[in-house]
Amino acid sequence: MSRAFNFCAGPAALPEAVLRQAQAELLEWGAERASVMEVSHRGAAFEALVAQAEADLRSLMGIPDDYAVLFLQGGATQQFALLPMNLAAPGQGADYVVSGHWSQRAVAEGEPHVRTRVLVDAADAAGLYLRAPEVDAAAVDPDAAYLHYCHNETIHGVEFPAVPDSGAVPLVGDFSSTILSRPLDVARFGVIYAGAQKNIGPSGLALVIVRRDLLERAGQPRARVLTWAAHARAGSLLHTPPTFSIYLAALVFAWLREMGGLEVMAAINQRKAQRLYHAIDDSEGFYRNPVDPASRSWMNVPFWLHDEGLNAAFLEESREAGLLALKGHREIGGLRASLYNAMPEAGVAALTDFMGDFARRKG
Ligand SMILES: Cc1ncc(COP(=O)(O)O)c(C=O)c1O
């Protein structure tokens, strides 16, 4: 049996070359004669690994020197709460753009810590999220601690075609499901953060890229372990980090550099997404994706069968064909294919071939 093509939204497929390297050095890592999981995070070898991971990420994303890079525990959801704790003074407000499930969650988790205001909610009259909203920089509260938005809504498959303008207020972006999929102008942001388990590595790790001047904000009374500045001072080694997740992330960053960097990944990702959207749009209504074409995600493609009664057959037969995890999120139903960096073009071709064949047989 060969490895299947895994379209899971997260934890998601990892590059096969990365998994093979991890497999080859699982028992003895480098000169350590022990697994990377078994060595101290305070040892020179692991410190060098973290430094290399950060250097590779900085080079891939062109992260300017006035930004700190943090590898933290707790996933993206924990950052929903750490964000106001670190950036907002007691009693201060923060503006939020809501474009789907995850930006809603950011508001909900932020609420105990900051006066949240929803600047714009992109739901249509039926409550559906089908397009990235326009953000009016002039409408952002100039006293807000930050403006938060989610660049790519993983469940709704809605991605901002461009980075919104937040005026003078620091812009904070949840990039969990689109980071490293294409180049990004980091200097537009106060903070970029992402859970790792889609385009970075295994779950349990969150990446935070934060402009250094923001680390000087007092924020709110909180423990040191919840303080970004403390993690920055400690080089992400304030306490025991998720060492195996960081190791795999480092392998992913090295793999991306070998692939040619983010311009190359962007071209591949665009081709993959176009192939799948064409298969949907050219199916004469057998498949449907209702997202506004300008806001369609390159990473997460939800789609629906014209007859939802065929969902179970689609899922069973696709699984038998080696195409995994195509079930849609329970919140919106239907089907969904996630096409992160680790999904090869051959995987998308196998999916569109299967979809064409399924439509011919059941249409
Ligand atoms: C865009 C986005 N933000 C946040 C999260 C939450 O991430 P975590 O489960 O790492 O807390 C997810 C998870 O899928 C996501 O897709």
Image (cartoon, helix red, strand yellow):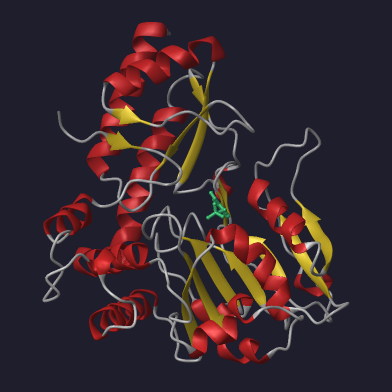
Residue at image point 32% right, 76% down: 53
Total labels drawn: 0
Give the vertical position of 170 relative to 353 (above or below): below
Residue at image point 33% right, 47% down: 271
Question: Residue 201, how many percent across, how many down?
Answer: 36, 58
Looking at the picture, tell me which residue is in the foreground, 149 or 275. Answer: 149
For residue 88, which quarter of the picture?
A: bottom right
Question: Residue 250, how many percent across, how many down?
Answer: 29, 69
Tell whether 344 sits left or right of 305.
Answer: left
Looking at the picture, tell me which residue is in the foreground, 338 or 249. Answer: 249
Residue at image point 54% right, 32% down: 289
Tell whether 48 sits left or right of 164.
Answer: left
Name the quadrant of the C terminus: top left
Question: Residue 345, how many percent across, how many down?
Answer: 26, 43
Name the quadrant of the N terminus: top left
For residue 169, which quarter of the picture?
A: bottom right
Q: Is residue 234 something one can see in this rendering?
A: yes
Give the vertical position of 204 relative to 216 (above or below): above
**Residue lying furthest top:** 362
Tell whether 5 sits left or right of 11.
Answer: left
